[in-house]
Amino acid sequence: MSRPMIRRALTLMLPLLVLLATPAADAAGMRETGARETGGTLATGGTALVHLGAAPGDYLRGRLTVESGRFDLDLVDGAGVPLRHLGSSIPTAGSFHHVVGAADERLRLRAVEAGRWRIDLDPPIPAALQRAPEPELPSPTIAALARDLARGGDTAGFWAEMARRGTPLVEPADRPDRRIVTFLARGARRNVRLFGGPGTGHDELERLGLSDVWYRSYLLPSETRLAYQLAPDVPEFDGTARERRVAVLATAAADPLNRHPWPADAPDIWARESLLVLDDAPAQPWADADASVPHGRLDRLRLASRRLGNTRDITLYRPAGFDPARADTVLLILFDGREYQRKVPVPRILDAMIAAGVIPPVVAVLVDSLDQDTRGRELPGNPDFADMLAEELLPMLRSTAGFTPHPARTVLSGSSFGGLAAMTAALRHPEAFGNVLAMSGSFWWSPPGTPETGREWVAGRVAAATMPPPLRVFLAAGIYETSGDGVTASILDTNRHLRDVLMAKGVWVRHREYATGHDYVAWQGVLSDGLVALFGRDQP
């Protein structure tokens, strides 16, 4: 045999088992099925060494399979000194992972009980090949742009096309009921975050190489309707998690290439959001209804509350042709009243629905929140706020409008903390409020100091009640409202749980989920759906 052939033979043999015969070793039982797989038998106390067949820095993966007996497995150096313990008295199987430190490292197998074994080694991954794979690009358009940039192209044509089409970028997916939606931003220096949208926590956009393209793609149901903003170069600083999270508000603004601003009359880009409405999104006919229908009357009133020790604005809506003696008239009390006139055209929605005859006449009281801090104290499960509604707001309505609503025709409604307030106030005063319309209710909330076993306080109250609460309930949440903090559950999960508890108690409940997030553009449709579910012409 020539010297080159001898060297080649030795090279091929290097990864094979080197069985150092000891008095307890049974060489005749050895099995070799390939360069990376080998095995044999060992008597009790016998040992065997396995060459790694790998170079320093290589990533090595392997498995020990025990067909009978028990084995210890260690990594040793060339002198047999243990470097790493990989398993003790292994009875069936064990896997191991290692980055090779020196070329003479070996696996040492020792039989605790005589038996048969096999070791399989995956091909080593050299250090030179240990690099992150190219990012997966679900958007065909972004993938094509990445290839073009790799060939020396630029982004000018891409951005011209996006300006023509409008953003986000929407592309077909693997199923007819889904779309690939890619949010885009141009030219940020450090970061871009998606404020709102389908993400659950201010999702970060990625930069495409060194270009001026920042992107993030989602696979979304074709029924999606949501609002979002883009936040480029969000300040990063040493602060609490809360302080760093709310810093997104400093730069969040409407998407400059989105053709659907909302609200359209917002004073600036920071007060404006951008809409994504996919082709199968449920219609919101009443939000865009013909303004030629008869209009109701709006009166701005002041409510001084001794119970709360403050004074606030409320807006009273009375429908066209309002008859206070009409028995089927509904009273709607809606929290965050200022927002439900600035962002959601509640009076116009009610005008259109009443004119079309899909609901009976509705008197609406839109209750303003004084400020965010006061809102955070009053709406979440506050008995004084509930008492204010029953003992001060209702008498004021009777004296102002000459209208005494029946509890079965009275509904409390709100979104987020407002949905929570609607449910807790109705539970406290079912003699006054017989219906709840909760939109993305914050049912994850519990009073400060609540033990872990008492989380989801509202569901717990309902479950503990000896009698089912005499309420009719409409619950709604967005499928993207899934973010929890690890301690409290999400809005979506807690709405589902409350639905189940109410149903188990025999309470009349209707529950809907929408392909949306936590925003008013969804709630303007949910409000209409809830009123139809509770008081539509086919309802009692």
Image (cartoon, helix red, strand yellow):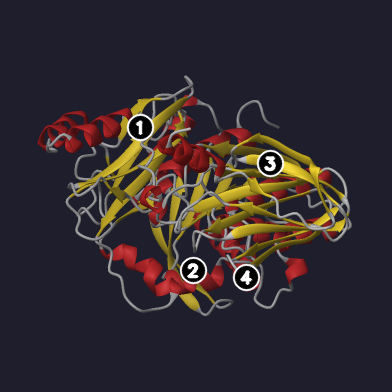
Q: Amino acid at mark 3?
A: Thr
| Residue 38 circle label | 3
Residue 335 image point, x, y percent? 50, 57
Q: Nearer the viewer, residue 201 or 307?
A: 201
Q: Which residue is denoted by mark 2 in the rendering?
A: 375
Q: Nearer the viewer, residue 244 or 426?
A: 244
Q: Earlier in the sequence, mark 1 or mark 4?
A: 1
Q: Regarding mark 4 in the picture, which secondary structure is present there?
A: loop
Q: Pointers 4 and 3 in contact (CB under 8 A)?
A: no
Q: Regarding mark 3 in the picture, which secondary structure is present there?
A: strand
- At label 3, counting other C-alpha atoms closer than 10 Å, the crowd grade (few under 14, some 14-19, many 20 or more) is many
Q: Pointers 2 and 3 in contact (CB under 8 A)?
A: no
Tell me the quarter of the image containing the C terminus.
top right
Q: CA distance from mark 2 to mark 1?
A: 29 Å
Question: Residue at 55% of width from left, 32% of height from top?
Answer: 359
Q: Earlier in the sequence, mark 3 or mark 1?
A: 3
Asked if residue 290 can be seen in this view, the reply is no
Q: Which residue is denoted by mark 4 in the rendering?
A: 382
Residue 411 image point, x, y percent? 61, 48
Q: Which residue is denoted by mark 1 in the rendering?
A: 288
Q: Earlier in the sequence, mark 2 or mark 3?
A: 3
Q: Is residue 498 left or right of residue 52?
A: right
Where residue 330 sits, quadrant-wise, is: top right
Q: Nearer the viewer, residue 206 or 40?
A: 40
Q: Is residue 492 depicted above or below 88 in this figure?
A: above
